[in-house]
Amino acid sequence: MKKERVGIVGVGAYLPEKILTNYDLEKMVETSDEWIITRTGIKERRIASDQDAASDLGARAAEVALKDAGLTPEAIELLICATITPDMLFPSTACFIQRKIKAKNAVCFDISAACTGYIYALNIAEHFLKNGTYRNALVVGTEKLSAITDWKDRSTCVLFGDGAGAVVLKKVKQGGIISTYLGSDGEQADLLKIPAGGSRMPASLSTVEARLHFLKMEGTELFKHAVRLMAEAAEKALAQAGLTCKDVAYLIPHQANIRILQAVAKKIGLPMEKIYLNIEKYGNMSSASTAVALYETVKFKKIKKGDIIVLVAFGSGLTWGATVIEWAQ
Ligand code: ACO
């Protein structure tokens, strides 16, 4: 008998209207449009308004996904939010989203796995649905990275942007999630972090003066891990599904750097035409990146029923993971 799977039955996204181009950045730090494009593939990114926090972006994406799934907010039983830019350290951003969209019957919590957060959250939701604890789930990846970016640090400020993506999940009769592979390596935790503002180094006048409440990254070191681990995650998830790269219609990756994705494509033997790219428009949106990319592949009709797609991500932690899905919408 065919095993019952969990599938994506609704997708949504929200991108702030304000666009910050590489030319705008040229006026802020010692950089150039040419350097940013050739080293990263990014031309512009979105910046959320001062009034909006991660939950505002996430709630808008969630509303689009609920409409797409034909579900009311009250029907949602589980709401997981993946973010590294929560509105506050607590309560969870998921609870703020719950309040905004009026998903009053949902159990809500956040997960923190940086850019892989969305894939981790999908996997957690899948388990809850598979074992029958809940009948449906809303998974949101939302980031206001502009709030933790040091706009004086050219090595990081050119990379990030704001945005949100969301999906609704349910048990499905056709298609659905076939396999997921996740990994973590805390030995490399210092490669990308915000040093101050937590219990290790509480925020103080001196931490703010030293700009320790902003994101710090060792980009070149991360680059190497990203290529190796994204390739490994995609290959392991495909192997678990009994598939190979030849079966893949689209690889939908976390968008950190076009050169990382070119190297991953080469390593796993997948042509670049099969890799969905939107880094040019949005930069790296951490846990929102893969979520927005999935939304766009659906909206722009890049994938059709029966297609095998692979979501793959890598991020701070280190964390990495991939999910193989037979598209059924
Ligand atoms: N404009 C102009 N020059 C710059 C800029 C800039 N914005 N930034 C750095 N440079 C300079 C450096 O100072 C350096 O100059 P030097 O040679 O005189 O010292 C030179 O450019 C090269 O710098 P590198 O850091 O070696 O450049 P690299 O080719 O490694 O690219 C980058 C840097 C884009 C950050 C890349 O390393 C990268 O994408 N890393 C991976 C990021 C990633 O995957 N993050 C994890 C996911 S994100 C998450 O989890 C939230």
Image (tube, rainbow, N blue to C red):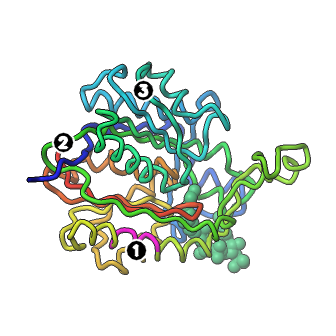
Residue that appears at 31% across and 40% down:
129
- Please tell me in which quadrant of the rendered image residue 70 appears: top left
User: In this image, 304 relative to 75: left or right?
Assistant: left
Q: Assess whether residue 19 is covered by the magenta stretch.
A: no
- Please tell me in which quadrant of the rendered image residue 205 appears: top right
Q: Secondary structure at mark 1?
A: helix
What's under tag 2, amino acid-wise?
Val
Q: Is residue 295 above or below residue 73?
A: below
What's under tag 1, amino acid-wise?
Glu
Q: How far is mark 1 from mark 2, CA to CA?
A: 28 Å
Q: Earlier in the sequence, mark 1 or mark 3?
A: 3
Q: Residues within 10 Å of mark 3 (few under 14, many from 20)?
A: many
User: In this image, 113 relative to 217: left or right?
Assistant: left
Q: Which span is picked out in magenta?
A: 229-235
User: In this image, 222 relative to 324: left or right?
Assistant: right
Residue that appears at 58% across and 34% down:
92
Residue that appears at 29% across and 27% down:
67
Q: Position of residue 132 (x, y in %)?
A: 29, 38
Q: Mark 1, mark 3: which one is toward the viewer?
A: 3
What's under tag 3, amino acid-wise?
Ala
Q: Earlier in the sequence, mark 2 or mark 3?
A: 3
Q: Which residue is mark 3?
A: 106
Are the two marked residues, 1 and 2, in contact with CB atoms closer than 8 angstroms? no
Q: Secondary structure at mark 3?
A: loop
The quarter in which the C terminus is drawn is top left
- Which of 185 and 225 lies nearest the eye of the viewer? 185
Q: Which residue is mark 1?
A: 232
Q: Residues within 10 Å of mark 1 (few under 14, many from 20)?
A: many
User: In this image, 195 relative to 164: left or right?
Assistant: right
Q: Which residue is mark 2?
A: 172
Q: Is residue 205 visible?
A: yes
Question: Farthest residue toward the right?
Answer: 206
